[in-house]
Every structure is written in structure tokens, then in C-alpha cells.
Amino acid sequence: MSTSVSESNSSISARYLGSLFSALLAGLLFGIGLLLSGMNNPAKVRGFLDIFGAWQPALMAVMGAAVLVFAIGWRLIGKRQQPLFERQFHTPTMSSINVRLITGAAMFGIGWGMVGLCPGPALVDIATMNGDVLLFVLALLVGNRLAHWLIGPAR
Amino acid sequence: MIAEFIGGALIGLAAIWLWLANGRISGMTGVISSCFSWIGRGERNRLWAVCFAFGLILSMPVLLMLGYMPEAVDMTSHKGLIIAGGLLVGVGTYVANGCTSGHGVCGMGRMSLRSVVATLVFMGFAILTVAVMAQVQRLMEAGL
């Protein structure tokens, strides 16, 4: 085996390790953001959704700030050819607004309103080892796989 | 409102970092599905999602170690609600191909019409569900 091959292999694997570490960091930062904003507390989320009752509007700032920061970053990065650790940007390709999208979003909204947890905060709250949180996460994972086997990925 | 704003900005920063570094959208639904693909078929290009999920789960212990006490998790203890809600969230996010993060933060930030519609629909149904549940509870407390 020539040295140039092993060198290029090791540089690819260093890049791959970098991509894994950066994903871990992103998950950690995302989770800390959810925790600082209080999105991990289902009662607070349900208070935010209760606009006809005792509405607690503070969580509006979470989505507002998150969308704003992401939108600015998206434009700044826009013209780059390649991400730092991968070969290409995995740009979302689906754009159709169809029955499948609306049905899924409606089901998700009903479930979110019933309990007050969406997938990100549910994963963050696993660390509490609260039995009810774990039951919710289990049901969520079962639902994800049921839809995968019965309906299949969106096209 | 300050904590909420800072938290939201961190979420946006994390999502933009994953885009810049990995070229991936920070959607929890995609992360969860990709974790299953990695477990089931060992797809190497899905391992990033396992790392991302691991980071999410680590975030609470890390904050506690830094001396910050996050808000307590005030969860309903009604098992039927928890199971039905979890199943609906799991199925719904898979079918809609995204949730609060993928459609709500990244999709809206990209100004994708598809994501804006999805976000309006799930927010609308969530608000409606909370309103209906509050009404049912009032009726039950009044002895129907």
C-alpha cells in the first residue's frame, strides 16, 4: 500500500470524525437552547398554546429568535460550495404542499397539544428519567416506526 | 422573555452550525428516523444523527454540571394521554416529514412555503387541542 493512499484515507477519516464531533456539539447546543428557553417543560408549552385561556406568550421569543438567527446564517452561508466536514450540502428537496403534509402536521399538532412535548424537548427530557417522559418517548418512537413501515418515507 | 430569547438564539445558532459544518438540517424527526436507519442498516452517513441525539440527551446533565438549574418538567401523569399523544407526535412528524425544528425553525428560516404551511397547521391544531381539552376539563369539573 502506498503512503499517499493511507494518507488520503486518514485525512478522510479525520474529516469524518470531525463531522461526528460537530454533530454532537450541535445537539448539545440545541438542547441547551431548549433548556434555557424552558421548552423542555410541557406545562409551559401548553400555557403558550392556551391562547384562549391563561396565555403565556413568552415562548414566542424562542421561535422568533431561532428563526431569525437561522435565516441570517442561511443567507450568509448561501453561496458556499461545501460544508466544513462533508462533501455536499443536503438541501431539502420537497416543496409540494399536499394531503400527506397537512394530515401529518395536524396529527402532530393534536399530539403536541395533548401533552406539550415535541420531539426535541422529549429527547432532552430523557435525562430526567421521569417514567411519564420515557413512556412518551417510547410511544413517539413506536409511532415513527409504525408510520415508516405502514406508509413509508415521503416522496 | 430574555431567557426565552437567548435560548431561541442558541437553537438557531446550533441549527446553523450543523448546516455550515455538516450540511444537514437540524430536524428532530429526521434525526430520529436516521438513528433508526443507522441501527437497522448501519448506514455510515447516518451516524451524525446518533451523535446529534446523544448531544441533545447530554444537554441537561451538562447544564446541571455548569451549575444551571433548568425548569422542572411538569408532565401530565394521565397514561392514556401520554401514549396517545406520543403516538400522534411520532406518526404525525414522520408523515409530515418534520416538526417544530425541521419545519418550524429551519424551514421557516429558509422561507420554504411547504414548511410555513406545515407550521401553521400544527400550531393551529395544537392551539385547538389545548382549547378543547380545557373546555372538557371545565365541563367535567362542573359535573357535566
Image (cartoon, coloured by chain):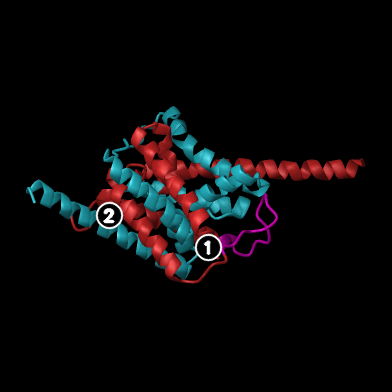
Chain colours: A red, B cyan
Residue at 39% from the left image edge and 49% from the top image edge: B87
Look at the numbered disc 1 and give the secondary structure of its residue. Answer: loop
- Report crowding for label 1: few under 14, some 14 to 19, many 20 or more residues within 10 A (C-alpha): few
Would residue B27 be visible to someone looking at this image?
A: no
| Label 1: chain letter | A
- Report crowding for label 2: few under 14, some 14 to 19, many 20 or more residues within 10 A (C-alpha): many
Residue at 62% from the left image edge and 51% from the top image edge: B22
Give the foreground label among 2 and 1. 1
Residue at the far front in the pictured view: A150
Residue to which mark 1 is pinned: A154
Given the image, on which type of amino acid does mark 1 rest?
A: Ala
Residue A133: horizontal and vertical position, in percent? Answer: 37, 38
Residue A117: horizontal and vertical position, in percent? Answer: 36, 47
Residue at 35% from the left image edge and 44% from the top image edge: B83
The answer to whether the residues at label 2 and label 1 have Cβ atoms under 8 Å apart is no
Residue B123: horizontal and vertical position, in percent? Answer: 33, 60
| C-alpha distance separating marks 2 and 1 | 28 Å
Nearer-N-terminus badge (2/1): 2
Q: Main secondary structure of the magenta part?
A: loop
Along the horizontal axis of the image, is A116 left or right of B135?
right
Q: Quadrant of residue B82?
A: top left
Residue B98: horizontal and vertical position, in percent? Answer: 47, 57
Along the horizontal axis of the image, is B140 left or right of A27?
left
Q: Which residues are magenta?
A: A76-92
> Between residues B22 and B49, which one lies in front from this camera angle?
B49
Along the horizontal axis of the image, is B86 left or right of B43?
left
Residue to which mark 2 is pinned: A49
